Image: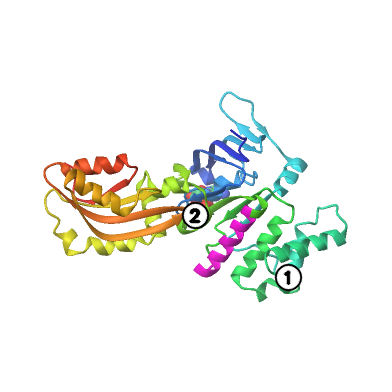
Amino acid sequence: MTTPIVSLQNIDVTFRPKGRVIHAVQNVSIDVEKGDIYGIVGYSGAGKSTLVRTVNLLQEPTAGSVIINGETFFSNQIGQERTIIKGKELKEKRRKIGMIFQHFNLLNERTVEENVLFALENSKEKEAVKKEKVAKLLDLVDLSDRAKQYPSQLSGGQKQRVAIARALANDPEILISDEATSALDPKTTRQILALLKKLNKEYGLTVLLITHEMEAVKEIANKVAVMQNGQLLEKGTTLEIFTNPQTELTKAFIETATNQEQAIESISQSEAVQNLAEGEIFAQLTYSGNATNEPLITSLYQHYGVVANILFGNVEILQGEEVGSLLVILSGEGNRVDEALDFLEAQSVSVNILKGARA
Ligand SMILES: Nc1ncnc2c1ncn2[C@@H]1O[C@H](COP(=O)(O)OP(=O)(O)OP(=O)(O)O)[C@@H](O)[C@H]1O
């Protein structure tokens, strides 16, 4: 195993405002490999921002370890001595971890190029070298023609691209994107995500993608962790999580990202589902890779005499793999539906029963 570029181990963050106790992050462990785009999803208040702010110690954990590229930034584990990097050392290390935010955080009284240049104020390079670098970065984010303009003259997507150029100024290996697309419309969101993907692919940039939008994760992340109330509910590859979610919250997130929420809602109202007969099951089947629609459904009939009435079908490409989803009513004799469901699960099809019960 290679050393993870970011290893967060048993991270706790507890706030104590005015006598109250808030467990913002509780015992969360995440390993991010170099080249990952690692999505961290959860609703507002789940603890995502607090967790990622521990990566560059903008937030000091209460307990746990933060290890970046094999180097311990912070450690406070039971039975061990507490260590933390500070001062100049911390400042230097922080420069190698870029950050972008929902509201861009640009300096409004400075031009686009001055905003990017500002990130290089501690660099010992000559002014001309810095300027050349800024020009290159603006070219990279496709904003060369806006160099002399002010943030107020730019669209949201352009502002975020300035912020990305600024975040890359010190050649970071890691970029933390904290809800960077949350204030943008869907089309601009896709453009920014495409830019992050390009930076990841062409420059090997590792991205921590904090978001409440599973759609963004689906679009570019190869791994994902789901958080709720400060805790990590589940983590895995995007393909694993989308095809076999373990928790109700993850299922709900996925439904929003795959337009299935609406399909399930409207199909649940259909006559066939409303009048589901005894022994019938209304279920969502999700599968990836080789399993395809037709052979699965044919097998159910051939082996178990179970008829699958397909009410909705959808195929998406995730991380280069096909992920299929069907909403079906299964009917058959005796406990044949039950056997058919076991068969499906043995074929790595994830079964989510929406109405009716197994025998
Ligand atoms: N400095 C702080 N002092 C006290 N409580 C805090 C502080 N920072 C965060 N919290 C609390 O910790 C919890 C987690 O907040 P956090 O911002 O990490 O969540 P989040 O998942 O990133 O949500 P959002 O996207 O809304 O920021 C919340 O209950 C929040 O109110």
How far is mark 2 from mark 1, CA to CA?
29 Å
| Residue wearing tag 2 | 217
Image quadrant containing the N terminus: top right
Measured as percent of width and height from the top left, residue 83 is found at: 67, 31
The amino acid on which the numbered mark 1 sits, given as a three-letter code, is: Ser
Question: Is the residue 244 above or below the residue 259 in the image?
Answer: above
Tell me the element at label 2.
helix
Q: Residue 176: where, in percent of width, then height?
A: 61, 52
Q: Is residue 153 visible?
A: yes
Query: Number of labelled discs?
Result: 2
**Horizontal side of residue 318 vs 36, given as left or right:** left
Q: Write down the region rendered in magenta.
A: 184-201
- 167, 17: nearer the viewer: 167
When the figure is inspected, residue 71 is found, relative to residue 53, above or below; the finding is above
User: Three-letter amino acid code at disc 2?
Assistant: Val
Foreground residue, 207 or 25? 207
> Residue 250, which numbered label?
none
Residue 74 drawn above or below residue 36: above
Q: Residues within 10 Å of mark 1 (few under 14, many from 20)?
A: some
Q: Is residue 228 visible?
A: no
**Quadrant position of the C terminus in the picture:** top left
- Cβ–Cβ below 8 Å for labels 2 and 1? no
In the drawing, does residue 286 fall left or right of residue 105? left
Q: x and y percent of residue 307 in the render?
A: 18, 52
User: Would you name the residue on which mark 1 appears?
Assistant: 144
Instruction: Using a 10 Å C-alpha cutoff, classify the residue at mark 2 as few (fewer than 14 neighbours), some (14 to 19) or many (20 or more).
Output: many
